[in-house]
């Protein structure tokens, strides 16, 4: 029998309130707005000598640490072809054609994504988890999935496989 195991973590604490604006349809830009984003993480693979796939507490705490970095921030993309973000002294300045947004830099987080969609935020969170686990010497699970809810019932997900 080919068995697989999966653990998932979603907690009331895995929520962040953050602003963003995305571009779509090749050049339309949303107005600045915010969401209460919710995050769920799943890990899949064989069970280890302790009979678990992954330590629930580590999964929860490492995800929470990443989520906290996004909380009460404006999410700005640094790889967008349309929105250009630069740090100017203590300000972060995002420009799109003749519009610009100047925000104290410590109220923003610059994300290396093309657009601050739920899909790419999920991918970024997944990458940060792998980075944390690599630095702690924790084995990377066979399958990692990150789900991000932007609005009630509207989830996007990213999956990384070893
Ligand atoms: Zn939005």
Image (cartoon, grey):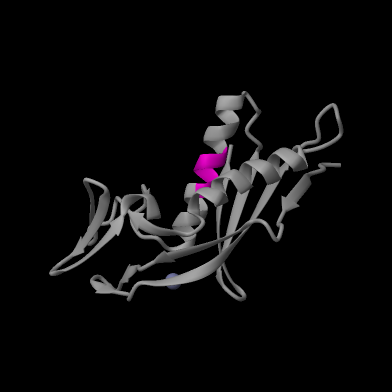
Judge by depth and name the residue closer to the eye, 139 or 69: 69
Residue 120 position, x and y percent, is 45, 56
Residue 130 position, x and y percent, is 55, 36
- Count the numbered circles shown: 0
Give the quarter the ligand 1 occupies. bottom left
Region of the chain picked out in magenta, as a range: 125-129
Left or right, 44 with respect to 158, comes to: right
Residue 46 position, x and y percent, is 77, 36
Residue 101 in which image quadrant: bottom left
Quadrant of the image containing the C terminus: top right
Residue 110 in magenta stretch: no
Q: Residue at x 76, y 47 (%)?
A: 6
User: Where 36 sits versus 4, above or below?
Assistant: below
Q: Residue at x 27, y 53 (%)?
A: 92
User: Where 100 sits versus 110, above or below?
Assistant: below
Left or right, 42 with respect to 117, comes to: right
Residue 11 position, x and y percent, is 71, 57
| Dominant secondary structure of the residues highlighted in magenta in the image | helix
Q: Residue at x 77, y 38 (%)?
A: 53
Q: Residue at x 78, y 44 (%)?
A: 4
């Amino acid at each position: 029998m080919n068995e697989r195991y999966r653990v998932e973590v979603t907690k009331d604490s895995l929520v962040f309130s953050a602003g963003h604006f995305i571009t779509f349809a090749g050049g339309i830009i949303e107005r600045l707005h915010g969401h209460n984003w919710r995050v769920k993480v799943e890990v899949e693979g064989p069970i280890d000598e302790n009979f678990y796939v992954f330590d629930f507490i580590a999964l929860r705490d490492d995800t929470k640490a990443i989520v906290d970095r996004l909380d009460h921030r404006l999410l700005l993309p640094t790889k967008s072809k349309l929105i250009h973000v630069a740090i100017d002294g203590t300000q972060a300045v995002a420009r799109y054609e003749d519009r610009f947004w100047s925000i104290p830099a410590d109220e923003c987080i610059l994300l290396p994504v093309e657009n601050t969609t739920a899909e790419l935020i999920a991918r970024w969170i997944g990458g940060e988890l792998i980075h944390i686990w690599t630095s702690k010497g924790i084995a990377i699970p066979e399958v990692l999935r990150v789900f991000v809810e932007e609005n009630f019932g509207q989830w996007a997900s990213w999956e990384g496989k070893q």
